Image: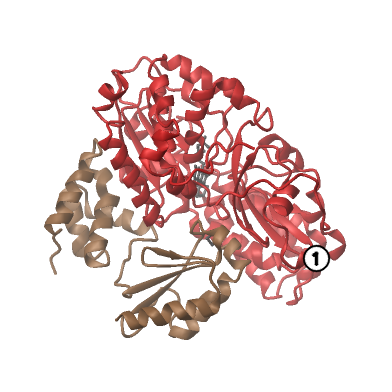
Amino acid sequence: MEFKFNEENQNKLNTIISHYPVKKAAVMGALWLAQEQSGWISGEVMKEVANQLEMTLEEVLGVVTFYTMYNQKPMGKFHLQVCTNVSCMLRGGALIFDHIKLKLGIDDMHVTDDKMFSLEEVECMGSCGTAPMIAINEDYFENLNISEVDNILESLKNKN
Amino acid sequence: MEKIILPDIKDLHLIDIYIQHGGFAAAKKAFTKTTDDIIDEVKKSGLRGRGGAAFLAGLKWSFMPKSTDKPKYLCINGDESEPGSFKDRQIFEYNPHQLIEGILITAYAIQAKIVYIYIRGEYHKWIKLMQKALDDAYARGFIGEKMKETFGTDFSCEVYIHKGAGAYICGEESSLMNSLEGQRGYPRVKPPFPAQNGLWGNPTTINNVETITNVPPIINKGWEWFSKIGEPRHPGTLLFGVSGHVNKPGVYELPTGTLLTDIIYKYAGGVPGDKKILCVIPGGSSMPPLRGDQLEGVKMDAESLKNAGSAIGTGGVIVMDEDTDLVKVLARIAHFYHHESCGQCTPCREGTGWLEKILKRLVKGEGSSSDLDLLISVATNIEGNTICALGEAAAWPVRFMVTRFRDYFEERVSKEVSLSVKNKVHSMRNTSIPLAPVTR
Ligand SMILES: Cc1cc2nc3c(=O)[nH]c(=O)nc-3n(C[C@H](O)[C@H](O)[C@H](O)COP(=O)(O)O)c2cc1C
Ligand code: SF4
Ligand code: FES
């Protein structure tokens, strides 16, 4: 399916482009906007970004694959990012990751059948002082324990 | 103790409150001075970088060429991805305008017309907070064309946020520049250094968020005042982020030279269950770990920590109690660096993979004593043989932890059970220094 930025995002993209002397520098911003709009970075997205920023498809692909936050496939409605790095690990982060894995029955970087949840084991998120933490889409949930994680997951299920 | 970066002022993140407390007076003052005067002032203050390497900020600025027609750039490094570090986000949230004011002064000093604040992509919330602060500062005429009128100067600059997308390596300054230019974030071979050949081949200065937030108070109160705070060779305060096994984890702004044991016991409330400390990483996960019995008397500044056998890094203090499984911890650290290696240099790409693999073997109880020597040898072969310092960042924790905890690792190699080396750990202590108010 062909990808086009909607009007609002096209305007945002034009502003981002104006911040740099070279169009190509707007690629990360363009990919962020596209991901907000369609949830992930498809081949069509990359084509459109390459087109607008006068880059080759390979260059855009090279950027997409360099970073962990550009989804190269559709993720769940709620993308759960669990930090298991040292400071979180010391306070139970790894246990939370294993718990969610079991509870949702999915592995790292997988999506539940109903497309509601996806799970990702992430590196330090800068919440070590409020560890353990998970991020759900863009929001941080900190100072967690297993039962709070359960509560959060329940409330998300009910949101639908 | 006076707090310079995160003072206890309610709602300081609002521009009106910031102005009420003397905000933007330093910028006004700076624009009446010559750029050389400002660089000189910051040089004399002894301000050192807060991003990891503790390099003198004023000296770095003085490397920017003066006689050039090329555009100059300033990059503010807010990638903050070093495990154990969570301080810059406090500035975005609680004192963004002091960062903006520091940016204006620094941009003027090095004559950069365009400034990028590179913020890690995971910090969606803090990017929004920072953008709001920038919008407010623009609206007041503190940034952009209007600042000429506001400050009565002929200098102006634009400030933009560049959002990262999840890559620890992009905190390395040359990788950050490639990332910003829209390339893959590969670190560049140095020299040439950014001051000569930075963004799009132009002179560029890169400083950490906290470094630049120190600049307005230095301009306001003078270099002498600043140079007298904390440890003379590394003056000022630091935002110490304390995490792991402490009762009150969090960010504490304290003078450099504060005792590590005071940070842990006085400010961060000691270890839960009054357990003993097995290991502390004093400056973020890349820095050499210290044993529990090495902590006494260690002061938290670049020079003292060097003498103690570690480094200040980002000031992220990770505390591990006596029941911690160090092998698992080290395996997790090794996994991180392997995952984050950009893969350009063979010693780093292959070496980090080996370290992870061997350590995972040890976790499973399938290791042997010779694996410990192998770990040290692999780590040693990475160090000094790579394009960027991620090589050292990956090698140091392994080499120092295995060496310093050799007895522990020897016991642990062939067993799944977690052992603690009780006789070697630091014992509980009480300090006589009164408790200072705690930062948020
Ligand atoms: C692998 C790696 C990651 C780094 N990450 C950061 C970071 O997240 N933030 C930062 O300010 N500096 C980071 N640095 C240090 C920067 O390269 C650079 O020295 C620093 O931003 C300079 O600012 P300062 O002089 O104000 O400290 C990193 C260095 C390396 C080697
Ligand atoms: S040392 Fe590692 S991270 Fe740095 S450039 Fe080489 S491969 Fe990349
Ligand atoms: S280790 Fe989990 S947020 Fe830092």
Residue B201 point in image, percent of width and height:
34, 30
| A50 over B18 or under it: above or below | below
Residue sitting at 30 percent across and 32 percent down? Answer: B143
Q: Is residue B279 left or right of residue A152?
A: right
**What hue represents chain B?**
red
Q: Colour of chain A?
A: brown
Left/right placement of residue A123 relative to residue A45 reads right
- Which one is in front, B162 or B347? B162
**Dot 1 amino acid type:** Glu
* Vertical position of residue B159 compared to residue B337: above or below: above
Neighbor class of circle 1 (other Cα within 10 Å; few <14, some 14-19, many 20+) is some
Q: Nearer the viewer, residue B397 or B321?
A: B321
Residue with the mark numbered 1:
B410
Which residue appears at 60% of the width and 40% of the height? B238
Rendering coords of residue A20 (x, y %): 25, 38
**Residue appearing at x 36%, y 63% in the figure:** A138
- The answer to whether B406 appears left or right of B94 in the picture is right
Tag 1, which secondary structure?
helix
